Amino acid sequence: MEEKSWLNRIDFMVYFISDNIISSLGFSTQENFDSLLKGEIGIKTIDDINYYPEPFPASAIDEKRLKEEFQKLATKYSNNSNFTKLEKMLLLSVNDALSKTEIDIASGKTAIVLSTTKGNIDLLEMKKSKNYEHERVLLWKLGEIIGKFYHNPNEVIILSNACISGVLAINTAAMIINSGQYDNVIVTGGDILSKFVVSGFMSFLSLSPTACKPFDKNRDGLSLGEAAGTIILSNSPIIKEQNIVFKGGSSANDANHISGPSRTAEGSFIAIKKAMKEAEMDSKQINHISAHGTATPYNDDMESIAIERHGMQNIPVNSIKGTLGHTLGAAGIIETAILLEEMRHNTMLKTTGFQEIGVSKPINILNKITKKELKTCLKMASGFGGSNAALVVSKIY
């Protein structure tokens, strides 16, 4: 029998069957969503010279809770190995998402896709690296540790393409399910605050001195965050009633600059256009947009141009980065998980920090929690190197 390639699509229906978020606002999707509904903000001032010589605002997880929760998981799996902070976050996130399904992660028909920008980057620091083998800082090794912990027989697929990594990982998962190669794909992703990451963004002068303000007239930079998230996709639904399915996804590079996005939003425009084409939909069918919304001057303006070029300027748009910060390789995953929860509750979250429109196109930024029937939604992502991605999700009944 001829082996199926990823390009030979069979076109299974791809269902979103479970998800998890571990962030400053909680250790489950429900905890995070409830906190967002309450208007809680996970971005706080961090005063720790292990990250940066001066205080800076960021969204950090509760390390005491992480230690306690992971100890329960390690005991369950009788695993006393020495795990890094990021490994603990990812393993816990996968465990929580798995617990709501009957999927066998040890099956050859279940794949794992890992999204991260920096992985165990903190192991570049001498005082931490001495406790681990030198390969532990490499991304493939991080994937291997996750796969081996859960006894998955397949090689973990690594997606690391700047800040579109999470959305790209979801798109890839849907593609390989459509190929017939796997029945289920566990997409997990995460990044942590570290001296390397904080100093890097400081050198760009891109960090706001306060919690960031996406799309706002007075926005002055992004806020960093750390998080882990997991989304499980399958060719079989978990419930008989309402389900949310992947309809289409794409990516494009605007080839503009190593860090700055295209001023005409070319890459984002193309990514959205191709995602809509795969979904066999047009912009009039989109009910809500989850934007990348970093609160940097050029990114937010670029997204407004892409949205307006598609004639979607009246569609409600939000960004959750004013609450959770920019979580890098986790961003596309946790923001999609939040979008799925918005759809389940027909409730759109506000864009924390936004007060007055500050982009060149008058798009419809949500400044309050809004109820609306959400059937089809768009997720956008952008990142360094001119990278852009988009995906479309819909409810089916």
Image (cartoon, grey):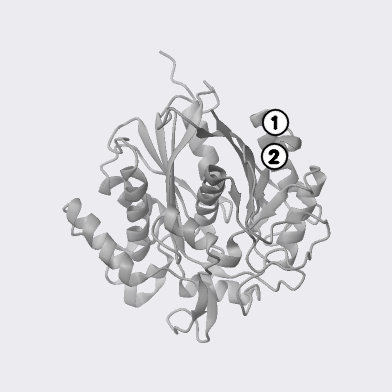
Out of 150 and 262, give the one closest to the viewer: 150
- Residue 171 occupies quadrant: top right
Out of 62 and 199, give the one closest to the viewer: 62
- Residue 297 occupies quadrant: bottom right
> Quarter holding the C terminus?
top right
**In the figure, is residue 69 to the left or right of 258?**
left
> Which element carries disc 1, helix, strand or loop?
loop
Q: What residue is pinned by disc 1?
A: 281
* Residue 128: image location, x then y, percent: 33, 73
* Residue 32: image location, x then y, percent: 46, 59
The circle on residue 98 is none
Check disc 2: other Cα within 10 Å, few if <14, some if 14-19, many if 20+: many
Type of residue at label 2?
Ile
Q: What residue is pinned by disc 2?
A: 286
Query: At 78% across and 48% down in the image, what residue appears?
Result: 314
> Which element carries disc 2, helix, strand or loop?
loop
* Residue 151: image location, x then y, percent: 25, 42
* Residue 240: image location, x then y, percent: 43, 27
Type of residue at label 1?
Met
Query: At 64% across and 76% down in the image, what residue appears?
Result: 208
Residue 18, visible in the rendered structure: yes
- In contact (CB < 8 Å): disc 1 and disc 2: yes
